[in-house]
Amino acid sequence: MAASVREKQTAALKRMLNFNAPPLKNTTAEPVWKLLIYDRFGQDIISPLLSVKELRDMGITLHLLLHSDRDPIPDVPAIYFVMPTEENIDRICQDLRNQLYESYFLNFISAISRSKLEDIASAALAANAVNLVTKVFDQYLNFITLEDDMFILCNQNKEHISYHAINKPDIMDTDMDGIMDTIVDSLFCFFVTLGAVPIIRCPRGNAAEMVAVKLDKKLRENLRDARNSLFTGDTMGTGQFSFQRPLFVLADRNLDLATPLHHTWTYQALIHDVLDFHLNRVSVEESQGSEASPAGARPKKKNKKSYDLTAADKFWQKHKGSPFPEVAEAVQEELDTYRAQEDEVKRLKSIMGLEGEDDGAISMLSDNTAKLTSAVSSLPELLEKKRLIDLHTNVATAVLDHIKSRKLDVYFEYEEKLMSKSTLDKSLLDIISDPDAGTAEDKMRLFLIYYITSQQPPSEADLEQYKRALVDAGCDLSPLNYIKQWKAFTKMAATPANYGSSGVKPMGLFSRVMNTGSQFVMEGVKNLVLKQHNLPVTRILDNLMEMKSNPETDDYRYFDPKMLRGSER
């Protein structure tokens, strides 16, 4: 099977940290000790992929931010991994003038322009440090891989390329062009790292089309320059008729506005929705003990604890897509298994301490020596298991607190019914008016889903009633006003997005989770089973992959950067 995006980007980073030479495998030699200097962009790219231990194994003794105060370390090479911004270039030139390190390996996350390269050359010349700049590389790694098959464009300044930024009514053409260039640069880097030229499909007449046109042009220009092409392994001759090329579908967010507003019920999505979860790291406020602080004393400050949810965490990999009650049950099962193993070790220990020389004791002793040896050898594995159980117990408990305090199970079930056009057992107004059901944001999200998915928009009188209830609940009505204009503008009322006819069905609560000995008190939380949804994006991808004729996708533009110009439609 082809290597995943995560593996390819990790391999590219390891190569960079080995002075842009392939890392030697199974070598016992000591690595070359070096420094890693990165900016916030570089830090965001490296942190989900390489741990501090892995960096140390590759010889990185210190990793420092470019714009921090750094002391000279004259006898050590430094690897820089930064964006080619004006500010970063100035700081690199300053480092050259101050002669901080023995040698400089400059790696730019995105391609550096010629003029900025000349600025570095001038600074190196002026500082008499030309021989210290050993290598300058464009790495084309301007995207962040979070999972084997998922990446995001950026974490720093992400609001600059957000839905809000693109759809602002007062956006200037130059700003729009800048946003499109930023998106295209990241996508281009992604395909360079992947080592494949995609077939691009997109709808007409929106931002997705602008990105597609620019990306096609950028790929085409790179392929035309055969000597400097970044896709050398996939040349025109061999790749033209290859079936191993990716299909890249660019969709506009307006295609499906309801799904991102939807309250979720799976573990990973709930963590993303209700906790502070960025770049695979989740921060949880630790709950204080039940003892009250003395009268007049300051309330205890809540401690924040961070956990990394990585590919090495087997429990996370297995259960991140599971419904929450299943996860709670699985954590409890893991805990029970761990306790049984721990008790076995304790039992063996007490047996090993047997006194008296009778035959029975000696035969038991020899019998149990082997068992204890195997138990001791499995201790590191047991400790790691305990760490992961503690991690998921804390994270799942924090999620459960949100579910119970905001009645997220009620929201999830109700929204599923709205999106699948099922019959509703409770009026929308009752939920919005219920002071105990969720935050103002939860209520606004629920109402927006109702508004987006309804065949007929509510009458003005009904809308006024809903608005009053939303204002009373503390909601800001500006999202509703935007959706109202958007729906009128796109004439969506005639053809609302179809979310399939699936729904959820409540099941009896898990017996195990309801046990009194369980870590999780799931009382009052519904155990809802997920049904498969056929969301708009899924249908579009299916139509394009299977080449099905469908009014939704028949009008999509087709770009193949490898074909001659005449083939574009």
Image: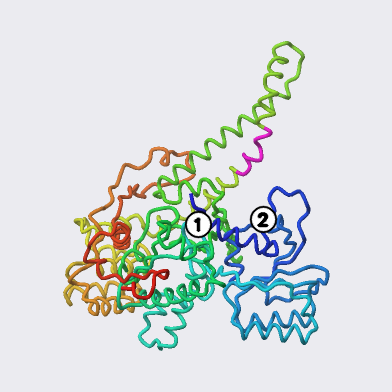
The disc, 2 or 1, on the residue closer to the chain's N-terminal end is 2
From the image, which quarter does the C terminus lie in? bottom left
Q: Position of residue 295 (x, y in %)?
A: 58, 63
**Which residue is at the front of the view, 196 or 333?**
196
Give the residue pinned by disc 2. 54
Viewer-proximal residue among 29 and 424: 29
Q: Quadrant of residue 381?
A: top right
Q: Nearer the viewer, residue 35 or 275?
A: 35
Residue labelled with disc 1: 147
Residue furthest top as drawn:
359
> As shown in the figure, which amino acid type bears the numbered disc 2?
Glu
Q: Secondary structure at mark 1?
A: strand
Q: Residue at x 50, y 57 (%)?
A: 147
Residue 469, placed above or below residue 9:
below
Residue 265, given in percent of the width and then of the height, sits at: 38, 54
Q: Main secondary structure of the magenta part?
A: helix
At label 1, counting other C-alpha atoms closer than 10 Å, the crowd grade (few under 14, some 14-19, many 20 or more) is: some
Q: Is residue 23 magenta?
A: no
Q: Measured from the top left, where is residue 9 in percent x and y?
A: 56, 61
Q: Is residue 501 above or below residue 495?
A: above
The answer for how far apart the CA atoms under marks 2 and 1 are is: 18 Å
Residue 365 got which mark?
none
Q: Is residue 142 above or below residue 522?
A: below
| Left or right of 437 in this view: 391 | right
* Three-letter residue code for mark 1: Glu
Residue 294 versus residue 466 in the image, above or below: above
The part of the chain drawn in magenta is 376-384
Say left or right for 265 vs 32: left
The furthest residue to the front = 237
Q: Residues within 10 Å of mark 2 (few under 14, many from 20)?
A: few
